[in-house]
Amino acid sequence: IGFQYELELSDAERAALKVEQPEDVAVMLLLFKQETAKQLGANVRAPLLINVKTRLGLQKVIGNCRPRITVSNLSSAVG
């Protein structure tokens, strides 16, 4: 599955991460296992943001806004 995730950082978040270029930030989602459904889920409303150059990170909690997420199946592209 492919994921495209778009979000905006505040000035304080950019300063905390010491971001110089947007490409320096990796966005990671926390996965969890749902025991009753035996499925994996992702916490899309609180991604981890890691500056890969400075190795600083934070968890960004997204309030009431809906994140723009596009999920696509990449298995058809492999082969």
Image: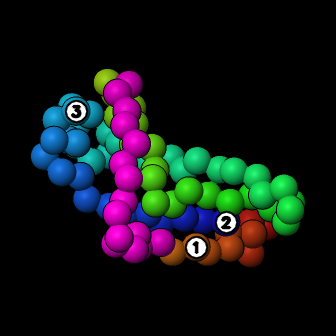
The residue pinned by badge 1 equals: 71
User: Does 32 sit above or below residue 3?
Assistant: above
Q: Is residue 53 above or below residue 34?
A: above
The image shows a total of numbered marks equal to 3
Check disc 2 and report its element: helix, strand or loop. loop
Q: Horizontally, is 13 left or right of 47 in the view?
A: left
Depth check: 29 or 45 in front?
A: 45
Cα distance in 3D space between marks 3 and 2: 31 Å
Residue plotted at (34% across, 27% down) = 56
Numbered disc in front, either 1 or 3: 3
Q: Earlier in the sequence, mark 3 or mark 2?
A: 2
Of 39 and 20, which appears nearest the observer? 39
| Residue bounds of the magenta highlight | 55-69
- Residue identified by numbered label 2: 1
Query: Chief secondary structure of the magenta span?
Result: loop
Q: Position of residue 53 (x, y in %)?
A: 34, 27
Q: Which residue is mark 3?
A: 16
Farthest-out residue, top: 54
Label 2: few (<14), some (14–19) or many (≥20) C-alpha neighbours in 10 Å: few
Are the residues at dot 1 and dot 2 in contact (C-beta closer than 8 Å)? yes
Residue 10 seen: yes
**Which colour assignment does the render follow?**
rainbow
